[in-house]
Amino acid sequence: MRPSQKTAFTRLHEQAGMTFEEAVAFLAVSERTAQRYQSGEREPTRLGLRMLKQAAAKRCAPIETGRPAFRFIDLFAGIGGLRMGFETIGGRCVFTSEWDLHSQKTYAMNFPDNHPIAGDIREFSKEPGTIPEHDVLLAGFPCQPFSIAGVSKKNSLGRPHGFLCDTQGTLFFDTAQIIAHHKPAAFLLENVKNLEGHDGGRTFATIMNVLKNELGYHVQHRVISSEPWVPQKRQRVFIVGFREPNDFDLKSLKLPLPENGPKLGSILLPPDQVDPKYTLTPKLWQYLQDYKKKHNAAGNGFGFSLFGPNDVTRTLSARYYKDGSEVLIDQPGQRPRRLTPQECARLMGFERPGRPFRIPVSDTQAYRQFGNAVVVPVVEFVAAAMRPYIEASLAKQAARPAPQAYVRERAEPIAAHG
Ligand SMILES: C[S@@+](CC[C@H](N)C(=O)[O-])C[C@H]1O[C@@H](n2cnc3c(N)ncnc32)[C@H](O)[C@@H]1O
């Protein structure tokens, strides 16, 4: 069901941060009745709707009444890893795009909102004016090759060309179109480390060329590994751009030391809280051992990896649901197990003491979502470093005389939330 087609019951219980089962208990109705509310076959009672509205409003309150330092949009949002980092520094999310329905479900459950989740970004980049004004753009866009053979030829002929022909048909192109239209004060793009070497470095070079030379931004990038913050080695490239020149220096930011980072034991659940279903079946365990033996004999290091409480894991991948082989938890005296989805939420920094993360989807979907996500404290770190520059840019913009129409457009949201 698309968010716009959600019934009031579904929208409100999600905004209230309740699962379907919790909403059933909250309204004290039968599951069958709630299913009718969910499908739209029947309307909840007026009292039921009021209760849900109150619960949703209560959960939304900190966002609604807070004083956002700036507004941002969350593209290719997944389950909101980038958003979490920028909410931590006081930003307010005004637009979200994520087309995967399972990710939307997790996102909606964890970010009670006043805006529905938009689907395919290509529908919006065609008309970027339909996206609300914002100060910061966030995007963990999927990495796709650009067919730039034609462009190189044009380059060699010294002809000018635009990102329209460099990157058309890719999701980076859609992101660039939105930046070109809205000219946000700053952006943060995030991707796998391999983006730098993708297609012999041509993909990255094209991206940087578009951002710097065609969109006119002051752009820097840095690969950051997550070990200082979570017990997982996960390297991601962060690309930061500012519209105005400033002293922001991504490369010189001092990262906490990885050797002082947390160890796996800090995120593992006590053994008695782990469902036995996460322990590998004898058949799968045998298969993984045989596979590793075969590859070791052939002289390569493919195969499962086993970790204990004093370790830091390999990168959790989106294929973790298949066999869990990249991060298996040692259980002395018995077969190893996979991480539970909740442990994945902790390993990615989505959940930490005092901040639970809701997982309303199947284990398979949850593993896929966490495996695709960013490590939240890494984003918080980059966001915190960007914050003074974002604010300075907005202050400068506010002080600058602007055309009347521009002042009117900006004045309303700032007055409402500032
Ligand atoms: C690498 S993940 C981003 C994960 C996110 N940073 C997080 O922390 O969860 C990329 C996301 O882009 C979404 N996506 C891919 N193509 C899309 C499109 N055309 N429109 C909207 N979302 C899209 C995918 O479903 C996926 O969730």
Image (tube, helix red, strand yellow):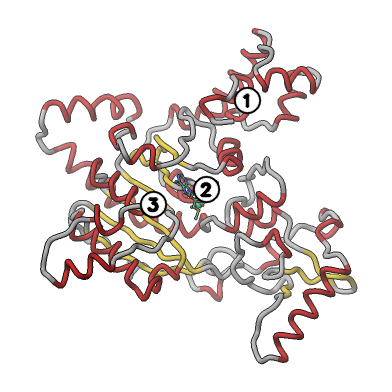
Q: Secondary structure at mark 3?
A: helix
Residue type at the position of mark 1:
Thr
Mark found first going from the N terminus, 2 or 3? 2
- At 87% from the left and 69% from the top, the residue drawn is 283
Name the residue nearer the viewer: 181 or 225.
Answer: 181
Name the residue nearer the viewer: 308 or 150.
Answer: 150
Q: Is mark 3 within 8 Å of ligand 1?
A: yes
Residue 151 relative to residue 131: left or right: left
Image vertical order of residue 299 relative to residue 357, above or below: below
Check the picture and name the quadrant holding the C terminus: top left
- Of badges 3 and 1, nearer the viewer stands 3
Q: Residue 2, image x and y in percent? A: 55, 31
Residue 47 relative to residue 396: left or right: right
Q: Which residue is disc 2 drawn over? A: 78
Residue 69 visible in this rendered orientation of the protein: no
Q: Which residue is disc 1 drawn over? A: 10
